Amino acid sequence: MSNAIEEIKNTLSEHCLDDTPTHRHRFLINSETADRIYVIAQKITNGEWQCSCPSWIFGRKKGRKYCKHLDALLPQLEEIDKIQGLIK
């Protein structure tokens, strides 16, 4: 894995998680409004960034692609995609 990706991971969260068979670049992120912790991860099969928060889960049913957690981190997440050559 690129050193640049590791640097981005360190700036996103101090709580990085190991990759799973279905997701990579997994981070724990604290809720700003509740005493909860969510997981942000990139789906391996299509490169989509996902969040475990209710807004993302239920928003997907309404066609939304992002939640406030992903919106806030999108510049760093896109940088990971660029480093991996997933987007130009």
Image: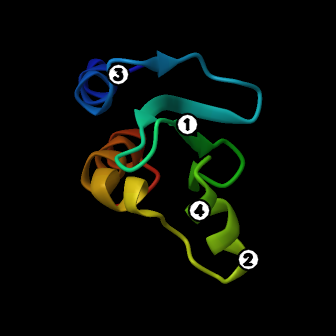
Q: Where does the C terminus fall, quadrant-wise? A: bottom left
**Residue 87 spot, x, y in % from top left:** 41, 59
Q: Where does the N terminus fall, quadrant-wise? A: top left
Q: Give, as a three-letter code, the residue at label 4.
A: Trp
- What residue appears at the point 57 percent right and 77 percent down from the top-left corner? 64
**Residue 26 spot, x, y in % from top left:** 53, 30
- What residue appears at the point 55 percent right and 36 percent down from the top-left corner? 39
Q: Which residue is mark 2?
A: 61
Q: Residue furthest bottom?
A: 62
Q: Residues within 10 Å of mark 3 (few under 14, many from 20)?
A: few
Q: Is the C-beta separation of discs 2 and 3 under 8 Å?
A: no
Q: Give, as a three-letter code, the residue at label 3.
A: Ser
Q: Residue 7's image quarter?
A: top left
- Residue 77 sits above or below residue 36 on the image: below
Q: Residues within 10 Å of mark 1 (few under 14, many from 20)?
A: some
Q: Estimate the spatial distance between the alpha carbons at disc 1 and disc 3, rounded to whole Å.
A: 22 Å
- What residue appears at the point 25 percent right and 26 percent down from the top-left corner? 4
Q: Give, as a three-letter code, the residue at label 2.
A: Lys
Q: Residues within 10 Å of mark 2 (few under 14, many from 20)?
A: few
Q: Which residue is mark 1?
A: 39
Q: Which residue is mark 3?
A: 2
Q: Which residue is mark 4?
A: 56
> Which is nearer the eye, 19 or 86?
19
Q: Estimate the spatial distance between the alpha carbons at disc 4 and disc 3, rounded to whole Å.
A: 28 Å
